[in-house]
Amino acid sequence: MFSRRDLLALVASAAAYPQTAASSAWLTITEASDLIRRKRLSPVELTRACLDRIESLQPRLNAFITVTPDAALEAARAAEAEITRGRVRSPLHGIPIALKDLYDTAGVRTTAASAQWANRIPREDAEAVRRLKSAGAVLIGKTNMDEFAYNFTALSSHFGPARNPFDPSRSPGGSSGGSGVAVAAGLCLAALGSDTGGSIRLPSAFCGLTGLKATFGTVPTDGVAPLAWSLDHAGPMCRTAADAALVHAVLAARPAAPFREVKRLRLGIPRRIFYDGLTAPMQTAMDESLKHLETLTAGIAEVRLPEFATNPDLGQMPTLFLTIISAEAYAFHRNMLRASPDQYNPGIRASIENGAKVEAAEYIDARRVMDEQRATIARHFGPADILVTPTTPGAAFALDNPGNLIYLRNSAPWNFWGLPALTIPCGASPEGLPLGLQLIAKPNREDQLFALANVFQSTTKHHTRRPSS
């Protein structure tokens, strides 16, 4: 409820704010925050612009499972009243943000895109949600996803597939597909995803966004439905690196670090596996991007990472990673599997059931190796500060012909090692589909990723491409 003071402030702000065009939904957080702070943009009108686009595009793109227009507008009005009185909580104050539908939201259903939880309404917010609310963000709805985050195609949702706004016949990637669609289509200014093997970075790459998987444990996952506790990460999906830095600062409860000079940063290229089997457009985009990155930094050198066994039948995915994710997913789901197996997507159920085959000793050995390598992985960077790889081997695959796990081959190892990884747009396929490159830093050096990505984006235009509608 609003106080009399709040209502008077809202009346005053109606005259102060200029009329906001629907194009405000395409602003970056950095741009919108500055306009809101200077009272040149109304949080209410910005939120309405996003809600109007959701109403128009949701039937075609299916980005959301639940939209909360009344609560969003209420939060926007509260933000506007506070800002009019001179209280600006953070750069996210008044900014419409969406949540992947595995973040608990008090009083709003959280389904994880499954029939198992189709009517589940949590009593408390996830910690990340609490932090966004405290920062004054306007939470606009819950985005579509693969069921319980155990897929990468956007096809396994109980509520139907999300569709890539650059071509609705294509996948937006998963499992945070709806979050990728929502930001790329101008339905919100940022969204939260989760990432266990690439589920923030894959849809960010397919949808032309900047997506961060921070250092393991940096962003709390309390109240986020788990896939595999040892590998899960929560994080932002945004239009720019500058925006991702602002959201990450709130999620990690730390001040946003100023962007540093990148000329002294040294880059490393781990060719083995990560650069194998790229499509011709992806190879071209990487060649051009590496040449440009070399001009921005202290140079590029080849590096060798620890050898890890892969499963050639499962897209060259690391076998130890597969052991851990299988065992931990089964541990979380085993009671629901026994009670109501028919409430799962058949493919997801089969994947979960496969975890019952993992022996305790096998899981313990995999965890031991993971812990050892997380403690020593930074040594393998050699002289490099940041590693550079393609995010995926190519552009988004067709919804009716989903690719295999090779699309997670370049992202899953960094979950195993717990390192921060950021994907940014680096080009487009001949069909106009976005392509992404991945930057990886040593533990807790997200600041270096943001700095380099920001300079790259200030000297290129890849991140400014939009869908046609």
Image (cartoon, helix red, strand yellow):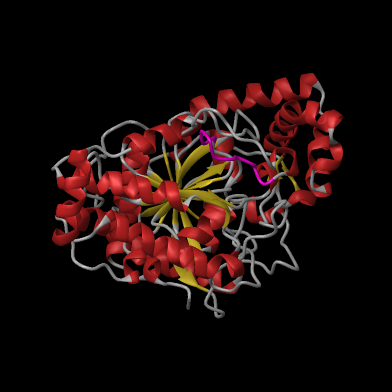
Q: Where's residue 405, x and y in %?
A: 70, 53
- Relative to the observer, which residue lies in front, 67 or 142? 67
Q: Is residue 109 magenta?
A: yes
Residue 400 appears anywhere in the view = yes
Residue 445 appears anywhere in the view = no
Say if 270 sits above or below 282 in the image: above
Left or right of 33? Residue 332 is right
Left or right of 437? Residue 81 is left
Say if 262 sits above or below 377 in the image: below
Q: How many marks?
A: 0
Q: Where's residue 73, x and y in %?
A: 37, 51
Q: Residue pushed farthest front?
A: 4
Q: Is residue 112 magenta?
A: yes
Q: Quadrant of the N terminus?
A: top left
Left or right of 454? Residue 68 is right
Q: Where's residue 186, x and y in %?
A: 43, 64
Q: Where's residue 384, x and y in %?
A: 38, 44
Asked where in the image residue 104 lies, by quadrant, the reply is top right
Q: Which residues are magenta?
A: 104-113
**Prevailing secondary structure of the magenta residues:** loop
- Relative to the observer, which residue lies in front, 67 or 413? 67
- Relative to the observer, which residue lies in front, 21 or 405? 21
* Residue at left offset 36%, top offset 57%: 47
Say if 22 sits above or below 379 in the image: below
* Residue at left offset 35%, top offset 70%: 22
